[in-house]
Image (cartoon, rainbow, N blue to C red):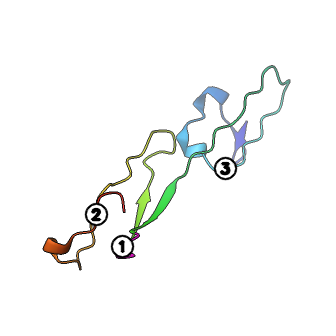
Amino acid sequence: MKINNNYINIKSLDTSFIGKLVRISGIVISVSKSISKPIKFHLRCSKCMHEKIIKSKNGLSGNIIPRYCDNPDVDPNDRCPVDS
């Protein structure tokens, strides 16, 4: 495989190649289905409509979606409900 006219070993492919078109020449021995995972989440609270963007760490690991709204403009005594 070539990167900027330099050849790279196929075993050197890592998460930095996620979302990029990679061309490998040769004979195809095995094919597997690809897995799609988001790299960015856009979340919105259904009560106060506060929006938050969470970026995935590397695209391969799982991500934790917050259960509580962290809107700084909401009164602490009138917090949004869990999973809203």
Secondary structure under the numbered disc 1 in the rendered image: loop
Image: 46 above or below 57:
below
> Could you tell me the amino acid type at mark 2?
Pro
Residue for badge 2: 81
**How many other residues sit within 10 Å of disc 3, few (<14), some (14-19) or many (≥20)?**
few
Q: Which stretch did the figure color magenta?
A: 46-50
User: Which residue bears the numbered disc 1?
Assistant: 47
Q: Residue at x 48, y 59 (%)?
A: 41
Q: Secondary structure at mark 3?
A: loop
Q: Nearer the viewer, residue 21 or 78?
A: 78
Looking at the rendered image, the disc whose residue lies closer to the viewer, 1 or 3, is 1
The residue that label 3 is drawn on is 20
As drawn, is 34 to the left or to the right of 53? right
Query: Which residue is found at the position 37% from the left and 47% from the top?
Result: 64
Q: Are marks 2 and 3 in contact (CB under 8 Å)?
A: no
Give the amino acid at mark 1: Lys
CA–CA distance in space, label 2 to label 3:
39 Å
State the image quarter where residue 15 is shown.
top right
Q: CA distance from mark 2 to mark 1?
A: 8 Å
In the displayed structure image, the side of residue 68 where residue 22 appears, left or right:
right
Q: In the rendering, which numbered label is found on residue 70?
A: none
Q: Earlier in the sequence, mark 2 or mark 3?
A: 3
The verdict on residue 66 being magenta is no
